[in-house]
Structures are given as structure tokens and as C-alpha cells.
Image: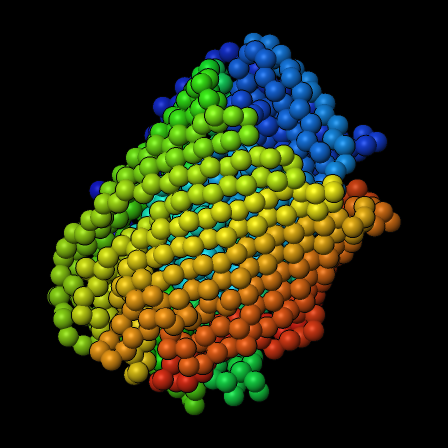
Amino acid sequence: MTKRWMTTGRVTHPVAAVAWLAAVLAAVPAVAQGPASIAGTVTAAGATPIADAQVLLPALDRVVQTGADGTFRIRGVPAGTTTVRAERLGYAPVERSVVVPAGGEVRVDLALPEQPVQLAGLVVSVTREAQRLNETAAAVGAISGKELQATRPTHPAEVMSQIPGVRVNVTSGEGHMMSIRMPMTTDPVYLYLENGVPIRSTGFFNHNALYEVDLPQAARIEVLKGPASALYGSDAIGGVIDVETRGPTESPTASAYAEGGDFGYARLLLSGSDTWGRDGLRTDVDLTRTGGWREGTGYSRQSATLRWDRELAGGTSMRTVLSAARIDQQTAGASALLREDYLDDPALNYTPISYRDVRTVRLSSAIEKHAGASLFSVTPYVRWNEMEILPNWSLTYDPTVYTTGNSSAGVLAKVRRDLDPLRARVIAGVDVDYSPGGHRENRIVPTKDGQVFTAYATSDLIYDYDVTFHSVSPYVQAEASPTDRLHLSAGLRYDRMGFAYDDKLEPLQTGRWRRPADTDVSYRHLSPKLGAAYEFGDALNVYANYDQGFRTPSESQLFRQGPALNTVDLTPVTADSYEAGLRGQALDRLSYTLAAYHMTVANDIVTYIRPDGQRETQNAGETLHRGIELGLGMAWSGALRTDVSYSYAKHTYEHWSPAAGVDYAGNEEEAAPNVTLDARLGYTPSFLRGGRVALEWNRVGSYWMDAGNTHRYGGYDLFNLHANVPLGSKVEVVGRVLNVLDARYAETAQYTQARGEELAPGAPRSFDVAVQYRWQR
């Protein structure tokens, strides 16, 4: 197919995009005098090294992680007196004041006493900078690097549910849908980041964004729940998910993780890292394939991440990350079955002709300079992605095949100033994004054998357009602490964004594939937030906040009109959220978090399913989202620990009449279980020498299958078993059994008048085992 959006004169091709960023980086000053640095080790009792501990300079918001041998080095530190703090889950934090000589290096060795329970002490997503959790007026959950390395998840669903109120389901391969304070959806109500940079442009959202990052080899996953548009802009309604890459190690290290399992599953994870003088490099590679447990659900992935950290003169640092991925999968979706086949033959696939082929490249460079009480930061980035897809979910009512893609050039810039009165801090910044792209789509004529689609022929060209998304978004945020225990925050962001749409075909306002005429669409929005947090002590920390969120329609919602009368005039979604929570720890063994929220969403963009099965995109009047989220952690002994994540939520249509004689007001939204639960029992006996055995119980409660609330799915319970056993200092064996009881369950379930109940079966019991080899000089 001709990809007209990849034209000359635009920053659209990946080579041109990389050249643009290289020109920006060329302006970075060369190294002059060697910067000062702090180096040392973090150990436990008996001088045992602690890996993946966080070492930070609170005054400078600088954070690094220790390597496998417990060593760390922080470069580019201004001369003078500063405080070094080390913290790690399971240990009490330790601080030390040090004097840093100009152009020299000071050594700091920190020994952390054991402490069975500790709340996540540091978060980044709330302010885009490192900040103590107890000072934040928000609900934030995190998956640590240690947990990711212990489980090496094969899918985001295997770890994300550990955060209260977060649910991820499996569509196909590593495909997924997210639910955070919203029903399970493919709509753009979540913002996905890699090291704080959006993985995708707002205008070209994809709900599968997490398969574009190397999740099993990440340093940390952080989830900010609820609206965050005052800081991040569009899409950040349900939450923000930030995946942090691992940084370089101080000494040469390498690892290989080879894994195999049922249904032809195989994965190889490779990693290498070292630091030379002021430069550190790290490379991570992920090679995955599977035949799939259902017919026609094979999947392969090749991805790589290269990170370069460099310290420059005068307290300036630079972190450059290059990520690329290729995802090739059969069956581009969950492929639901009619109830009879779901019960009798769950491995059956009605849509084996479906496929998805994705290619992505991202390059960013975060440059930071500390100057006294100020921090200056600029992060230029480029992105390129392309997807060819034959969607399986629309084969019964709208069979098509299409290619879509876009490129991006943008920058995230900010300045922060600390003020002595009231321990105040002001952050001001601007985000700029320019993303040209396009969409080319053909109708297909499929062939069926019973319920199974066996072949297809390409037919009419129904959509062919170029579209450019552009945005300029300044923001300001202020924080103050009138007392040592009270922390106040406020923020405001102005988003000015829009689309320039150029149709290559004639406008059409009849039939199933209507097309709008050439047009420009623009949006303006002002997003405020207010928050307060109060520390009574380690046992109790309370907070409350108000946040407003919004999101613009995506390009496919606006310009792929379908049978709707008008989609170009779709209104942006807005959300008003009120939240209160508390967190703390008691008896040195129990940690807890509790959050309650009330969120009203106006003009929600939803899909109305007609009696004939056709889908129509439109604004709903208003939806209401209420819930509580509870997290508990209990260390019963030095070897036994229990963690529970529980959520109760209710999502309702307050005002929505999609057609004459149809009114859903007062109904619960579909695909919105009231109860979700994830409970984990971990056992780390001394004879396993750092190994662990963990049993997990995952429960999803019942939910409505349709907006009319006529059919309900009963929910399910799953049990998973994980174990990792070190064999010496370099070799570790990892094993897992997923769906231990071989339960029959549905990842998604829906009802339509045209086809009745359709359920997408979840995977049966499966086994896999891995061997990891680590080397360090």
C-alpha cells in the first residue's frame, strides 16, 4: 500500500526523525571540568549487598539504583553539603550528610537495618520529579524492579493487578485492555509513558501501548490513578502508567534469561551494561514467540532498548533512550465465541484470518541541569510507528483491512525553582507535539465455513486520508508546606491542540462507510488540580484532592466515520474527580493504603451497538464512577508475607439516550465488574538462599455484558504459582504455573441482539520454566 503520510518535507520517516533529534543533541555543551560525584555501596546486616535499592539526593531530586553488587555512583553533583538517602522495600531508610568536593568524588557506604514493612517511599509520576509518597495528595501504586525480575511477566496482566484498582485483561499475544477507575475499554482514557515520555501521540492512541515497551526488563512500573490532565494533558483520565527503563551499572554485567513452556512458548531476554568514565550504556533485548493455545493465535516479538547515561559539566546530566519493537501476531483481538463453543471447544477461533503487524521506534534524550535552587530540564523526542491490521472484532459487521501510522517530533521542557519560605516549589513547563500520520483502509469480502472465517478478498478502498495532530501545552504547578506535616499542592495546565485532516477520497454521507470532507479540528482546555496531604506519622498519612481530566477524540474516532451521522463534531471528554485516602504502617509488620473516589465524566465517547450489530461512535451524556481501593501487606515472619489488593467500584450511565426509544440512564456500564481482588502469599525460607515461592489468587467479580443490563457474566477466580530458586551466585531457575486449577473463564464477555452472548476464553493451565545466568566482573 502507498503510505502517503511518509512524505518528504515532514518529520515523518524514522531516519529523518532521528536526524532531527541528533541535531538537537548536537547543541548540548561538551564536557569541561569533570563533575563531582558520590559513590558507595548499600548493604544489609552482615555486609550483604542490596541490589535495586534506591539512592537519592533529596535536595536535587537525583535517583539511581544499586547494581547486583550493591554499588552505586551519582555523577554531576554540585560541590557543597548534601544529604544521601538509601531505601529499599523490606529495610528501614538511612540518610547521611556528606561534603562533596568540587570536581572530586566522595564515598558513602550505607547499611540498612531490616524492617519487614515499608511503604513505597519515592514516586515520580505525581510531579514528574522524585517526591516522597507521604507528601503527595494522590493514589500511586508501583511494581518494583525486584518484583519484575522475580516474576519476569509474560503479559502485563500478571503483575499490574498487584496495584489496588488496576485490572488488565489479555486479548491476544501481549495485547491488552486496561481498567483503572473506568470499565474495561479500548478507549484513550489512559496515558502510557516510558521514562516520562508518552509512548504514543495523543491523536494516535492505541490501547495496546504496553506491548511496545520491554516490561519484563523494566526498572519499575508506576501507576498514578485518576485524572492527571493538570500535569499530563489529554488521555490522563483513568490514570497514568509510567514504565522506567533500567540504568547502566557501574561495572560490566551481562545476563541471559532463557524460557520455554506450553503451546510453543519461548522467550530469550538478554542484557548487558557497563560504565566508562562519565558514560554508561545498557542494552536489553526481548525475543519472544508462541504458537498460541488457540487455533491461529501465534505471536512473535523482537524488541531492543539502548540507554546511554552521560554526565556533563556543571551539574548537567543526559539520559538518551532508543527503543524499537516489531510485534507480529495472528488474530488481532480476543476472538470471542458463542456460548456453546466457549463451553465445548474454547480452542476454536472464528477469526484465524485476522492479524496485526506492528513496528515502532522511539528516541528521546532527557537533559537536566541543576543550578543552585533551580532545575532546568528539556527532553526532545521522536517517535515512529506503523501498524497493518485485519481486526477480528469487526469481521461480523464491518470486515476491513487497514494500515495506519504516524511519526512525531516533540519536546518536554520545564524549570523548577525551590523557595525557602514554606518549603515551597514552583514548576513551570511546556509540552509540544507534532505528529503527522495517516490511515488507508479497504473493505474485504470474507469467506466463512460455518462460524469460522477461512479466507478473504480485498475489495473497495473506503478510507484514505492524511491527518496531523499538533499541540502546545504550558503548565504550572506549585507546592508548599506551611508546617512540617502539612503539604499543599495546586496545578493548572492549558492545552491547545487539534487535527489537520486531508481526505484523499470524495466525501460521502450515506451508507456504512461515510467520510467527512477536509477539515481542521481544534480544542482548548484548562485543567486545574488541588491537593493536600498531612503526615500524622509513620502510622497514618491522609490526603485529599480534586483533579479535572479531559481527552480529545482520537483520529480514528473523528475521521473514520462509519455509519454515524457526524463524528467530526465529537466533543472532548471531561472528568471531575474528588478523592480522599489514607496510608501508613502499624506494628512494624502491617502496611495499608485506602482510597475512595467519586468521578463524573461528561460527554464520554462510547460505542452504541445497534440491533443489527452495527457500531456507532457518539458522546454519552454523563457517566458516574465511584469506588474504594484497599491495599494491605502483612509480614507474618521473616519468611512469610501476604499482600492483598481489593477494589469495589460502580460505574453507571447517568444520562445517555443513544437512539429514539432507548435510554440507558441509571444502568451500570458493561464490562465493569464491581469487585476485583488480587491476593498473594509469598514464602522466602532461608534454605532457598534468596529464592521465593508465591501463590496468587486473582478474582474478577460479575458484570453486565450489555448497556441494557439484560445479560450478566458471573466472573471468575484464578490461581497462579511462581517460584524462583538461585543455584549459586550466577544461576537461577524460575518456574510458573498459570491457572493452576485449569478454570474455564472469559477474558471478555458481551451480549448483542444480533449475535447473542459472546465470550473470549481465557488460557487454560500452562507451565513454563526458565534459567537465568548473570555475570558481573
Task: Look at 35% across and 62% down and name the residue there.
Answer: 623
Viewer-side residue, 209 vs 266:
209
Return the x and y of residue 575 as percentages of the image width and height.
35, 53
Residue 388: name its quadrant: bottom left
Give left or right: position of 748 versus 752: right
Q: Residue furthest bottom?
A: 450
Residue 106: name its quadrant: top right
Return the x and y of residue 63 as percentages of the image width and height.
57, 30
Task: Look at 49% across and 18% down and name the residue there.
Answer: 315
Residue 583: name its quadrant: top right
Quadrant, the N terminus: bottom left
Q: Would residue 612 be visible to someone looking at this image?
A: yes
Viewer-side residue, 120 vs 695:
120
Quadrant, the C terminus: top right
Task: Look at 37% across and 40% down and name the residue there.
Answer: 529
Return the x and y of residue 183 as percentages of the image width and height.
44, 64
Give left or right: position of 704 versus 216: left
